[in-house]
Image (cartoon, rainbow, N blue to C red):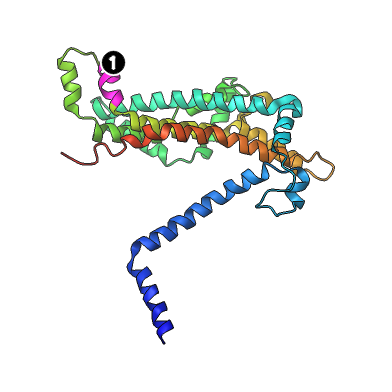
Amino acid sequence: MSVQRQRADRVNQVKGNPRVFTYVVLILCCVYFLLPVWWLVVASTKTNGGLFNGAHGSMWFDSTFALWDNLRQLGTYQDGIYWRWILNSFMYALVGGLASTVVSVMAGYGFAKYRFRGKRLYFNIVLGALMIPATALVIPTFLLMSRVNMTDTYWAVLLPLLLNPFGVYLMRVYCSESLPDEMIEAARVDGAGEFRTFLTVSLPIMTPAITTVLLLSVVGAWNNFFLPSVVLTNPNLFPITVGLSQWQVRSSAGSASEQIWNLLTSGAFVSVIPMLLAFIFLQRYWVGGLTAGSVKA
């Protein structure tokens, strides 16, 4: 009887303490999200045989540590085209992400701080664009690019990245809530022009939102798959997402094809490192002021 009472008391303590339930949910979420990452780290260190017939199962390292051999093969397979794909992804992510951020910042700032005819209509169009899935625009984008002879070029991937409705919406909301009109008016009274006011007064306050839009734009451009796979046919222009998918198709073609699963796993592992570093080094700018404007004075 006492044992049952002790168990009941423990159950009541767990139910009465919301922190325990919160911790359990957070731990389960961490395991859910980190387990695939752990598998990728382990798989990148295995040979082809170790991936399917490893001595310690799929979730633990094999007896042969083949990460360095896999990286060397990445540099020589198909004349090292993997590193060309990595450079292409860097170019798409940096150029496309930066350009998309610039457009979003200026558009959001304009919607928030300027009055012009049709402002509400144009912003409603931006909100409507948020409801359209990006994949639904791939075929119209391909038709447009083919009409202007831009398919199978870098521009076919970069130009669509400039439009980021969510970035415009986020910057508009942030500028409206966290950027006081009095500061802009004071700068204008002191004789600063619009461009100088934007650079010296508004831009520093907008840093957390700018960093957020930049991270989302860069990650979105780095992970972009469907659009490049449609508008590009030259392997030298592929980003890493499309390139790895081509290798997967080759490995899955059948027993007579070349099996390069070890290059797929190690290549996928290398491809996530740049985005991980980007979040690590930019998170202090990201988190630093996201709560600015949340409390009304």
Q: Nearer the viewer, residue 239 or 262?
A: 262
Residue 260: x %, y % from top left: 75, 39
Residue type beneath disc 1: Phe
Kindly indicate the quadrant of the structure image that contains residue 113.
Answer: top left
Tell me if 294 is positioned left or right of 297 in this view: right
Residue 115: x %, y % from top left: 23, 26
* Residue 234 seen: no
- Residue 265 to residue 93: above or below: below
Residue 273: x %, y % from top left: 56, 35
Tell me if 32 is positioned left or right of 22 in this view: right
Kindly indicate the quadrant of the structure image that contains residue 155.
Answer: top right
Quarter of the picture holding the N terminus = bottom left
> Magenta region: which residues?
197-204
Q: Is 102 a magenta residue?
A: no
- Residue 258 to residue 201: above or below: below
Residue displayed at 60% across by 24% down: 87
Q: Nearer the viewer, residue 228 or 186?
A: 186
Residue displayed at 32% across by 69% down: 16
Q: Is 203 a magenta residue?
A: yes
Secondary element type, mark 1: helix
Residue pointed to by mark 1: 195
Kindly indicate the quadrant of the structure image that contains residue 270.
Answer: top right
Characterize the magenta stretch by its predominant secondary structure.
Answer: helix
